[in-house]
């Protein structure tokens, strides 16, 4: 099996697992950080150290960081909690249809409670421009949400420019940075975003832990979604999982230390796969922006094949797509359709995503398997020879 | 045990579909084609029907999911060697049962019957074959 699905999740790095293990067993820092005894205070000290180290990695201060169960919770907290706090300005949110479902669904929840969603148009590469954002913002807009790196296509948004538009309009900008941490430099305070979501398991950390950057200067407030023991300054109750928090921060530190080298490595792998597929197959389309692209994701559409059949045929290749096949007319990737791709092309797409452990040999093998499958399915098709796509 | 999410029978027919392709034009195959709206799925069937009404051979082509490809392969194997009048009454229900098609994939059986009926209609009848050609 060749695993090219690192944008879905990554294996936990050995160094991370070892650091986590130190906080789990009787001989480690297993105590409840909320307990007022020596082991508890020691655990709390580890958490606060981790908070400072994590904040430093994203250009923030420790007081800006709230630990959560992952980017989904962070996105929910930012949007539902932010909307609840700031609804007196107006009940409008600006966002694009290419956002992750953990952004779209909380916003749809808000829509069911009387909020209006103003959809940002993306260009054909899936990018939101400052003009589109400016056009969508009204006097009643209190929140905008834009992901830093799109999880399906890997396109990178110009967050500093979009944040300036929001600042001038006094709109709070939330950024889903789940796919960006460890891949791109992040400067939360300097970019002047209000809230930013992170996850550990996309970069060699464990599942079930993430963080929300919540700007303290000037302060951004959210109403909590989880109530109880009042942890995280009352914003997110629940016993702090010391081992998970240590895992998040260790993974993020390792990724940051290797970031520039890894950027080049992933870029070479991406180019290698793209070159081989384009050389081996006619009628292949790149979904994304060549000029503003995270190197760990390559999203391609293949003319003349059925998406479900292609994914089924690639049985020994772990890749992904945004499609959900349940009937004759598969529900193709909503992200690609929002970018203007036809249903057929959006369905016949594959997302390849690379990680530190991906090798050139794996990429070569993947390319050969994809070429063989696409050729086989095109040969089976009654339309391919008759009407090859223009 | 196959490694896919598909039933064994479907997986085998999808991965190793026999009787796919087209006949040579001089073999004068009869042809039927069924498609879903916007041609998201297309099934084409070609038959060689003998003057005595026996289906001598069948080939298919398909653009679609593994179930459709498997259905095309199954259909060709099923009709080959059988009589055209018997196959004209083939029902989608039988195909769906034979292939254990899930409800959302029953359309594959419907497409198969539609392509088959078109191909049978396209095949010359015995009378047409034996009728003298106009000089």
Image (cartoon, coloured by chain):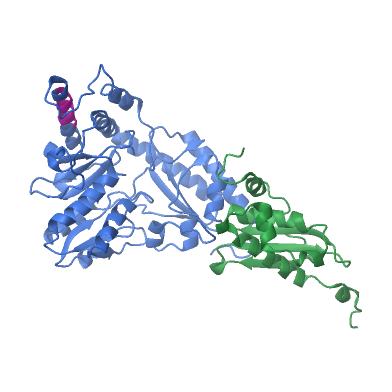
Is residue A389 depicted above or below B65 in this figure? below
Q: Which residues are magenta?
A: A42-50
Q: Position of residue B40 (x, y in %)?
A: 55, 63
Which residue does the image show at 82% across and 72% down from the upper left? B124
Q: Residue at x 29, y 33 (%)?
A: A255
> The chain drawn green is chain what?
B
Residue B58 occupies quadrant:
bottom right
Residue A378 visible, this orientation? no
Q: Is residue A8 left or right of residue A260?
A: right
Q: Nearer the viewer, residue A325 or A163?
A: A325
Chain identity for the colour blue used in the image: A
Outermost residue toward the left in this view:
A218
The answer to whether residue A251 is above or below residue B45 is above
Give x and y (percent) for residue B54. Answer: 85, 63
Q: Nearer the viewer, residue A301 or A24?
A: A24
Q: Position of residue A18 (x, y in %)?
A: 31, 22
């Amino acid at each position: 099996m060749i695993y090219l699905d690192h944008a879905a999740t990554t294996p936990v790095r050995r160094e991370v697992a070892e650091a986590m293990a130190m906080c789990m067993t009787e001989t480690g820092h297993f105590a409840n950080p909320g307990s007022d005894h020596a082991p508890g205070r020691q655990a709390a000290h580890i958490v606060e150290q981790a908070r400072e180290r994590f904040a430093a990695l994203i250009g923030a201060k420790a007081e800006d960081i709230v630990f959560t169960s992952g980017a989904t919770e962070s996105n929910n907290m930012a949007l539902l909690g932010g909307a609840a706090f700031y609804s007196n300005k107006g009940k409008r949110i600006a966002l694009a249809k290419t956002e992750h479902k953990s952004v779209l669904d909380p916003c749809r929840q808000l829509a069911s409670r009387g909020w209006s969603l103003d959809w940002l148009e993306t260009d054909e590469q899936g990018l939101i421009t400052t003009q589109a954002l400016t056009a969508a913002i009204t006097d009643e807009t209190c929140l905008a949400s834009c992901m830093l790196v799109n999880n399906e296509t890997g396109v990178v948004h110009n967050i500093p420019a979009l944040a300036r538009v929001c600042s001038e309009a006094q709109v709070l900008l939330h950024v889903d940075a789940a796919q960006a941490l460890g891949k791109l430099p992040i400067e939360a305070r300097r970019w002047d975003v209000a809230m930013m979501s992170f996850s550990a398991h996309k970069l060699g950390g464990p599942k079930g832990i993430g963080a929300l950057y919540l700007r303290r200067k000037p302060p951004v407030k959210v109403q909590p979604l989880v109530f109880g023991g009042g942890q995280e300054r009352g914003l997110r109750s629940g016993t702090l999982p010391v081992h998970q928090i240590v895992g998040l921060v260790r993974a993020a530190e390792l990724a940051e230390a290797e970031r520039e080298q890894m950027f080049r490595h992933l870029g070479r792998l991406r180019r290698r796969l793209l070159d081989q597929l384009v050389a081996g197959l006619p009628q292949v389309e790149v979904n994304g922006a060549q000029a503003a692209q995270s190197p760990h994701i390559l999203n391609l559409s293949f003319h003349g094949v059925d998406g479900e059949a292609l994914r089924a045929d690639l049985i020994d290749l772990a890749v992904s797509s945004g499609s959900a096949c349940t009937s004759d007319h598969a529900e193709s990737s909503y992200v690609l359709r929002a970018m203007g791709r036809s249903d057929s092309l959006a369905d016949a797409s594959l997302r390849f995503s690379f990680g530190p452990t991906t090798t050139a040999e794996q990429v070569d093998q993947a390319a050969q398997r994809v070429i063989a499958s696409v050729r086989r399915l095109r040969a089976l098709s009654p339309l391919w020879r008759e009407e090859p796509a223009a | 045990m196959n490694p896919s999410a598909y039933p064994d029978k479907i997986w085998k027919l999808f991965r190793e579909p026999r009787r796919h392709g087209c006949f040579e034009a001089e073999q004068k195959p009869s042809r039927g084609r069924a498609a879903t709206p916007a041609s998201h799925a297309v099934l084409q069937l070609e038959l060689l029907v003998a003057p005595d009404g026996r289906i001598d051979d069948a080939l298919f082509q398909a653009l679609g999911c593994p179930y459709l490809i498997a259905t095309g392969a199954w259909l060709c194997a099923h009709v080959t060697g059988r009589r055209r009048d018997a196959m004209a009454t083939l029902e989608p229900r039988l195909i769906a049962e034979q292939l254990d098609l899930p409800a959302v994939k029953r359309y594959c059986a419907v497409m198969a019957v539609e392509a088959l009926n078109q191909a049978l209609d396209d095949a010359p009848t015995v009378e047409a074959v034996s009728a003298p050609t106009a000089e």
